Image (tube, helix red, strand yellow):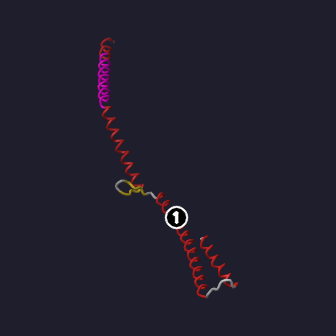
Amino acid sequence: MRSRKKGLEYVRSQTVSAIDGDILITPSVLRVQDKVSQASERSMLARALSTNRVHDLSIAEAARKERKEASSKIVQKYGEIYSHQAQREIALDKEDEKEVVNIRNNRLSKPWKKKYSRVMKELVVGFTDRHLKSTFTSAYTRS
C-alpha cells in the first residue's frame, strides 16, 4: 500500500512539473494516471475487504467450534454418540459390574452359609436335648 502511494506521489509530481511547463504531458497520459489511481484504490479496498472477510470467517469458525464443543455429541471409534446414549451405556455397564460382584460375593459366602446352618442345627439339637432331659428328670424328682 505504501509503495503504491509513493508511485502515485511520483506520478502527481511529474504532472505538477508538466503543469509548471518543465515537461510536456498529453491528455492520454493524464487519463492513464487516473486509471492507475482508480485501480490502486480498488486494490486497496479489495485488500481491506478481504481482511475483513478473513476476520469474519475466523469469528464464524470460532462460533462453530464453540457450538461443537458445547453440543452433547461425542465422536467415538464407530461413529457419533450423544451424551444421553453414553450415560445409558455407562449405567448398564455399572449394573453388569454390580451383578458380577454380587455373583462373586455369593460364591464366596456360600461355604460360610453352609457352616452357619450346620452350627445352628447343632445348637438347636443340643438345646432341645438338654431341655428335654432337664424337664424329664425334674418331673420324676419332684415326687
Magenta range is 110-133
Question: Where is residue 96 drawn, in percent x and y?
Answer: 34, 44
Q: How many marks?
A: 1
Give the x, y percent position of residue 140: 30, 13
Q: Is residue 122 magenta?
A: yes
For the point 55% across and 68% down, the residue is 51
104 is higher (above) or lower (below) than 83: above
The foreground one among 79 and 54 is 54
Report the front residue among 22 and 112: 22
Query: Furthest-front residue in view?
Result: 22
Residue farthest to the right? 20
**Observer-nearest residue: 49 or 106?**
49
The residue at which mark 1 appears reads as 58
Specify few, some or many for label 1: CA neighbours under 10 Å numbering under 14, 14-19, or 20 or more.
Answer: few
Q: Is 40 colored magenta in this rendering? A: no
Residue pictured at 50% horizontal, 59% vertical: 66
Magenta stretch prevailing secondary structure? helix
Dividing the picture into quadrants, the one containing residue 13 is bottom right
